[in-house]
C-alpha cells in the first residue's frame, strides 16, 4: 500500500508555539511582518468635482457647446458659458485683419469707403520699384500684426487716383466711417527715421 505524506500549511503569516520558541533560541529568523494591503481609495468621479469659474475658463468653444445639455440645471454655469462664448466670438471678430492686403481700384469703395464705422482703414498709395514705398510698406506690415483690429491695405497710386504724381509717393491715407481722417505724403511726414515706432498710433 502506498504511503501518503501530507504537509499542512497554516495561513500565511501564522506561527506555531514551537516556531516562537525556536526564534527565541535564535534557531529561526525573525517572523516577517504580516502582509497588509494598501487602503483602497476610489478614483475621483469627474461629475463629483466642483465646477467653478476656473473650470469653465479651461474649456474651449467646442467643449462649452457640448456642455450645454449638462448645464441646463445650473444657472450660474449656463450664464457664464454664454458670456465666455460671447467673449470668444468678439475676440475673433476684433482680430480679423493682421496683414497688409493688396486691393485694386475696383475694390476701393467696398474695402475702404464702405468699411464698417468701427473699423479704421489705413491705405498705402505706392508703386513697385520705389525704395521709399518699400520702407514704409515694411513698417505697415509690422503695424498690421500689432493692430489686427485695424485694416491695412495697399493700392498702386494711379489705380486709386489717376495721374497721381510719383513725387508724392508713398502716401498714407487714414479712413474711418467713409471719410479721410488723416493723410501723410512722403516719408518726410514721419521724420528722418521711418520705423513702426515712429508711426502714428491707430
Image (tube, rainbow, N blue to C red):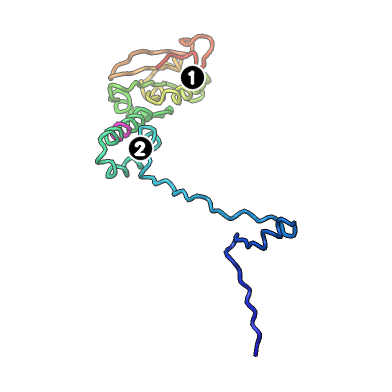
Q: Residues within 10 Å of mark 1 (few under 14, many from 20)?
A: many
Establish if 136 lies above or below 48: above
Horizontal side, residue 189 vs residue 121: left or right:
right
Q: Give the number of the disc on residue 91.
A: none
| Secondary structure beneath label 1 | helix
Our reading of the magenta stretch's main secondary structure is helix
- Work out which quarter of the rendered image holds the N terminus and state it: bottom right
Q: Which residue is mark 2?
A: 51
- Which residue is more in the foreground, 197 or 127? 197
Residue 166 visible in rendering: yes
Picture coordinates of residue 160, whole percent (x, y): 36, 23
User: Mark 1 or mark 2: which is in front?
Assistant: 2
In the rendered structure, the answer to whether residue 25 lies left or right of residue 33 reads right
Task: Tell which of 61 and 16 is nearer to you.
Answer: 16
Q: What residue appears at the point 27 percent right and 45 percent down from the top-left corner?
A: 69
Is residue 82 a member of the stretch shown in magenta? yes
Q: Residues within 10 Å of mark 2 (few under 14, many from 20)?
A: few
Q: Is residue 153 visible?
A: no
Which numbered circle lies on residue 136?
Answer: 1
Residue 7: say if magenta. Answer: no
Q: Vertical placement of 201 versus 83: above or below? A: above
Give me the residue at 51% from left, 18% from top. 132
Q: Which is nearer the N-term, disc 1 or disc 2?
A: 2
Range of magenta residues:
81-85
Label 1 close to label 2 by CB (< 8 Å): no
The percent position of residue 123, horizontal first and vertical second, equals: 39, 21
Q: Residue at x 29, y 28 (%)?
A: 110
Is disc 2 placed on a helix, strand or loop? loop
**Residue sitting nearer the eye, 20 or 169:** 20
Residue 49 found in image quarter = top left
Q: Which of the two residues, 131 or 76, is positioned nearer the viewer here?
A: 76
Amino acid at each position: 500500500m502506498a504511503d501518503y505524506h501530507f504537509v499542512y500549511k497554516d495561513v500565511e503569516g501564522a506561527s506555531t508555539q514551537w516556531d516562537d520558541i525556536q526564534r527565541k533560541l535564535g534557531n529561526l529568523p525573525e517572523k516577517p511582518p504580516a502582509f497588509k494591503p494598501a487602503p483602497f481609495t476610489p478614483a475621483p468621479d469627474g461629475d463629483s468635482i466642483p465646477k467653478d469659474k476656473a473650470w469653465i475658463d479651461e474649456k474651449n468653444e467646442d467643449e462649452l457647446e457640448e456642455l450645454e445639455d449638462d448645464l441646463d440645471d445650473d444657472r450660474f454655469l449656463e450664464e457664464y458659458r454664454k458670456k465666455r462664448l460671447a467673449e470668444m466670438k468678439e475676440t475673433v471678430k476684433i482680430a480679423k485683419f493682421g496683414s497688409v492686403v493688396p486691393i485694386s481700384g475696383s475694390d476701393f469703395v467696398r474695402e475702404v469707403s464702405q468699411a464698417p464705422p468701427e473699423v479704421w482703414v489705413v491705405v498705402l498709395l505706392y508703386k513697385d520699384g520705389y525704395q521709399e514705398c518699400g520702407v514704409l510698406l515694411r513698417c505697415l506690415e509690422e503695424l498690421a500684426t500689432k493692430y489686427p483690429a485695424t485694416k491695412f491695405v495697399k493700392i498702386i497710386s494711379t489705380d486709386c487716383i489717376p495721374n497721381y504724381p510719383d513725387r508724392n509717393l508713398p502716401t498714407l491715407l487714414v479712413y474711418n466711417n467713409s471719410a479721410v481722417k488723416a493723410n501723410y505724403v512722403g516719408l518726410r511726414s514721419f521724420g528722418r527715421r521711418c520705423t513702426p515706432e515712429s508711426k502714428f498710433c491707430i
